[in-house]
Structure formats: structure tokens, C-alpha cells
Image (spheres, rainbow, N blue to C red):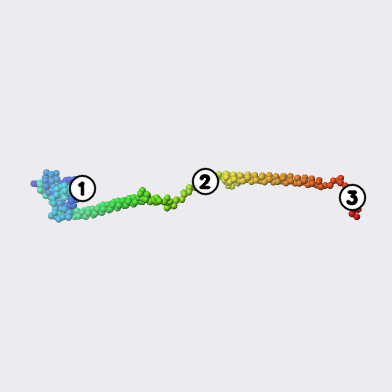
Amino acid sequence: MGKKEKRKREPSVVPEEEPAEEEGFQVEVITHARVKDANLEDPWEYRVKWAGYASDEDSWEPAENVAACQRLLDSFWTEIGLDNEDYPEGYVAKASKEWIKKERKRFKAEFAKNKEEERKQKERAERRKEDALTKKAAKKKKQSVEKQKSTASVPSRSASTSSVPQRNSQSSVSSYPAPPPSTPALPPPKKKAKLFTSDPEDSEDDRPLSSLGKKRKLSAKAGDDKQTKVRKTQDKTSVSATSSTKVKNFESSKRKEVRPSFTSPIPNRESERRRVK
């Protein structure tokens, strides 16, 4: 087979670029590539060094087993610089030691970073799980407390029946005192509306109409009392005048009766003197 021009191999497109991990195994580096079957679409298989295992544990893996290691495959074929079109079955392409050393160092850094990220993700997942459990327990406890409160506030029918005191069938008198009679609530006192108007005699303030009405009634009553007193005084005066007139008439008539008659004879004083001697 003559020497052919080196051409870059066109790798198959794989969406993921993270190291392949199956059953807990991780690809640390690819050291060799070999043509397994020229009739296949991708005839190559790869010698894989597994992370955490010795070199005697390396194995040949088909292309689909390392398809997730797209970045590592691209770097490997960039290092080899060959295509797979005219190579017979069993042809082996080997990567250089420098490239293998560089990729192993890169893997360790990424592996440590991935481990740290996995640890953080695991912690976050556990924290979310604990928070969910805590919230669930708190919600359950709250519901239990609310149920207990509702049960305590609303007693059951049997409890309410048992709490009622049973009356003795032999005695008609209850041992419990009778409740006091309920006193009906008195209605609130009615407030009288006061109307205000201006009095021409008192222009400085306004006085209630009710007070004005009372004042007018009092003044009218006082006037009536005054007139009544005047009438009584006049009646007394007229009565006293009538009485005095009657007395005068009586005295005059009496005087007329006592007055001696002018026709009676005048006693002779001389004769009387003689008789005395």
C-alpha cells in the first residue's frame, strides 16, 4: 500500500460532549484506534483507558460506546491526522505519549471539577428534599392542630347529651336553681329636637323655640293671675263698700229711733227743786 496524503477524519456529530459514563465507568483517555469492520458506517474501535483503573484494564470499545466523548474523539483524530476510508481491517492508529499525558492531566482537572459540581448538586438535591419533607411535616402538623381545635370547639352530640344533668325521676324538684327572669332591655331615651330662632328682643344669641314657648305661656299665665287678683280686689272693695253703706243706714235708723220727740213736755226744774227741798 502506497503512502497516501494525510487528511483529517470527519468525526460523527454527537450532541453531548461530556465523558462517557456507563455503569459507573469513565473514559480517561483514548490511546489507540483500530479498523474493526470496513463495511460498517463507522468501522473504527478505540482503546480506552478507564479512570481509576490500571493500564491492564484498558479495553477496545466500539464507536457507539465512546460517542459521548466527542471532544476527546476530535482531539484524538486531530492528533492522528488520518481518515478511515482506505485502511484495511486491523489497521491501528496510535496517539503520541505527549498527547496522552496532556489529556490525562486535563481529565483529572475536569474530573475534580465535575466531582465538586456533582457534590454540590447532590447537596442541593438533599437540601431540597429536606426542605420538602420539613414543609410537608409542618403542613401536616398544622392540619392536625386545626382539626383538634375544630373538634374541641364543636363538641359531639353524645358529649353534649352527656353534659346535660339528668333529672331524678323520684323527685320533681330540680337541684339546680332556676335561672333569673330575663329583664327586657329598656329603649334608649328619646332626644327632643331643638329648633332655634332669633328673638328681636335678644339679637346676640338664638334661643330655642321651646324655651320661647314656655316663656310665653308663663307670661300669659302671670297676666291671667294678675287679672284674677285685680278682680278679687275689686270684688272685696265692692263688698266692703256695700257693708259700710249698710252699717251707715243701720246707724242712721237707730239714731232716728233714739232721738226724743220735740212734742214731749219739758220738765219744770223749779218744781223739781221745790220738791227736793
| Residue 190: assigned label | 2
Lower sequence index among marks 1 and 3: 1
Q: Residue at x 79, y 45 (%)?
A: 253
Lower sequence index among marks 1 and 2: 1
Foreground mark, 1 or 3, reads 3
Look at the image and tell me in which quarter the C terminus lies: bottom right
Q: Residue at x 84, y 47 (%)?
A: 260
Q: Which amino acid does label 3 sit on?
A: Asn
Observer-nearest residue: 227 or 33? 227
Lower sequence index among marks 2 and 3: 2
Residue 210: image quadrant is top right
Other residues around mark 2 within 10 Å, as few (<14) / some (14–19) / many (≥20): few
Residue farthest to the front, as pictured: 170
| Residue 16: assigned label | 1
Q: Which element carries disc 2, helix, strand or loop? A: loop
Q: What residue type is labelled 2?
A: Lys
**Mark 1 → mark 3, Cα distance in angstroms:** 193 Å
Q: Which element carries disc 3, helix, strand or loop? A: loop
| Residue at which label 3 appears | 268
